[in-house]
Amino acid sequence: MDLMLQNLNSEQQTAVTTTEGPLLVLSGAGTGKTKVLVTRVAYILNQKLAVPWQILALTFTNKAANEMKYRIAEILSENNSNFYANDLWCGTFHSVCLRILRTNSMRAGLKSDFLIFGEDDQKQVLKSVFASIGLDTKEFVPAEWVEKISNIKDRGRNPNIDIGPRTKQILDLYNTELRRLNAVDFGDIILMVLDLFEKNPDILEKYKHQFKYIMVDEFQDTNNAQMQLLLLLTRGIELPNICCVGDDDQSIYSWRGAEIKNILDFDKNFAGATIIRLETNYRSTGNILGAANSLIRHNNGRMGKDLKPVNSENMGEPVYVLTLPSNFDESKIIADTIARQSNGKFSDYAVLIRTGSLSRQFEEEFTRIGIPYRLIGATKFYDRMEIRDVIAYIRLMIHPSDDISFVRIIQRPRRGFGQSAIAKMRAAGPDLMSGLKNAKFGGKQGNAATEFLNAFSFDWKSMSPTDAVKKLLTDTGYMKFWHESKDADAEDRLSNIRELITNVISAYQTLPEFLEHAALMTTDDNDTPETDKNAQAVNIMTIHAAKGLEFDTVFLPAWEDGIFPNEKAIKDGGLEEERRLAYVALTRAKRRAIITNTMSRVIFGTRQFYSPARFITEMDGRFLDFGGRAQPSYREPKHNFTHHEKPRQSIERTVGKLVNHNELGRGVIIEEHDDILTIAFNNVGIKKVARKFVTFLS
């Protein structure tokens, strides 16, 4: 037993050996929570407090469950135990509940061979439901309703939820059709176990008696249905042996149903609970932890803890904060820094972005200078559905015989051309575009064919690339399709399309030149770092995707009010979750963290000006390095404005003038474009700076 505990610190040992009664382990980033969980299971078994099938260990991914079993098996083997980790009830909430449903299917009102429907199956069921009550799928979009139904079911058993008569009608018909097909969806798996337990007390008592110890990983990510399951399994037990491990400061998934109140109210839900804080961090340096601690203290909705480094004598490098003229300088400086310092160890570096649309500037810059990268937790910019659609539209406009592009876009948006219509086109011409012209379609199909062909019948060569693409996407109805879409990610897709047109296509003289660029960006060679997990490649990912990971050096770009935190959080009171997200981002770094913000950023072709993220000024300046400059004070975000809102001075009056910039120093203006000045600075070279940020010296 000494061997089992000797590699744990005092906090971890207490968490492992506190086996009786409800226990909440507040495990900060990098404090060894998995080690505590697996050691606690092994300790309970070796103390003969339970046998494996009396332990329920719940996780959020199958990968985490398998890792837990593997590490428990290792500990048991090292301590010459006769128990087997595979006998544990260890798995995700859904896998464990599915096991219960399979065992008790008849009592749950299901056949033993019931099916589990995924999203595509759910959409087909919903289409059938909508057709049966005369609803148009253009207004009632199946994908949107899959998400809506999932959110309802994730709330668990709550008779007080008011979902409205139309939603109730659709939900009832949908569930009836699932039962007719002998199927359940993902949301049903937990919800039907809740129903099973409430309607069959004997089955609930059976599992309550079996599970002497319950353990939950990533407790801050639990939703209402999962919490209701835990409460049912412990109901009526004065001091249930439930141990939940989590971190309220890393609760960042409210948008997919996670309820932070579950962890904040733990001692209310489980009276007599013990709370243990794991605060010794084995990942990051003292300065990184100091910055993260000082930031998260600004949150009110937290239980409170401070991470401390293992080696408090060596604080490591400060957290660097760089203010740059523009987003173009941002991507260049980050790429140049990695190229100079990496020595080929690219996987030690990560660029963590608040939103997926920020990835493009780094993808392009890394590709330009030959830095391998992999995009994790998001789709590569040129692999995104809407970007590939736009490229297909352009390709078909330039190459009318491109059948691949034709098939991709003829039903985006839907125009009523199914497989039989495609076959008719193939028979009517050498290519599908010709076949569409030659085939005799009547009614709605005929009108749709005429509109589609007319949309391509303009002289795109006489127009600028951006104007030609805008006209094409407007006339074909593609932009209208996304503007009217009720998909949750429609606005993001529109943002990506605007990014492509205004910031990428606009840089090319002709559309064929752009297509060549796009082809190079999507080549298999460029995908190698993403598919080969052993390759040395810089990691580009959203902060959400980075949770649970760690890197030697982390770049944190676009820390600007309006981007991070985003406008919605600022307006709607969501700053605390955004701040937790910033905390997660900082604590991914082991040795070095670099935060960047820009004075201006081109958004959809318009230069907009930003203030540094308020999170920067909330951190204790003792842990930060601003390049020798003082920590900036917080400024309220300035409104966005176009180039023409400020009177333009003539070139003759500004070019050649000596100016001073508070952060970049002295320089000479060498070019002027509206409110943006190109300045040759003495110390940092040539930079583009907004006129408002410089003082004229001569």
Image: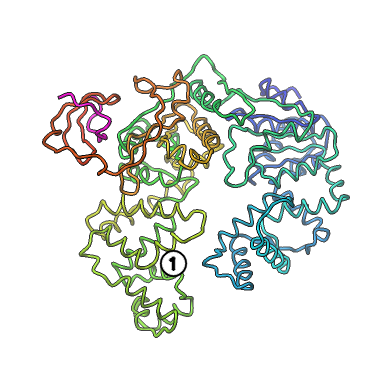
Residue positioned 26% across, 51% down in the render: 507
Label count reads 1
Q: Residue furthest top?
A: 313
Q: Splitting the image into 4 quarters, where does residue 163 fall?
A: bottom right
Q: Which residues are magenta?
A: 682-698
Q: Position of residue 69 (x, y in %)?
A: 69, 40
Q: Residue furthest right?
A: 202
Q: Position of residue 388 (x, y in %)?
A: 40, 59
Q: Is residue 669 above or below residue 472?
A: above
Q: Position of residue 377 (x, y in %)?
A: 50, 46
Quadrant (top left/top right/bottom left/bottom right) for the C terminus: top left
Quadrant (top left/top right/bottom left/bottom right) for the N terminus: top right
Disc 1 marks a residue whose amino acid type is Arg
Q: Is residue 199 above or below residue 38?
A: below
Residue positioned 39% across, 77% down in the render: 449
Q: Does the magenta-highlighted stretch encompass residue 482?
A: no
Q: Is residue 587 above or below residue 198?
A: above
Give the side of residue 666 with respect to residue 60, left or right.
left
Disc 1 crowd, CA 10 A, few/some/many (<14, 14-19, 20+):
some
Q: Residue furthest left?
A: 652
Determine which residue is flagged by label 1. Answer: 412
Give the side of residue 360 with respect to residue 688, left or right.
right
266 or 364, which is in the foreground?
266
**What kind of colouring is applied to the model shown?**
rainbow
596 or 578, which is in the foreground?
578
Give the side of residue 659 with respect to residue 198, left or right.
left
257 or 514, which is in the foreground?
257
Q: Does the magenta-highlighted stretch encompass residue 683?
A: yes
Q: Is residue 603 above or below residue 344?
A: below
Q: Position of residue 639 (x, y in %)?
A: 36, 39
Q: Splitting the image into 4 quarters, where does residue 480 fall?
A: bottom left
Helix, strand or loop for disc 1: loop
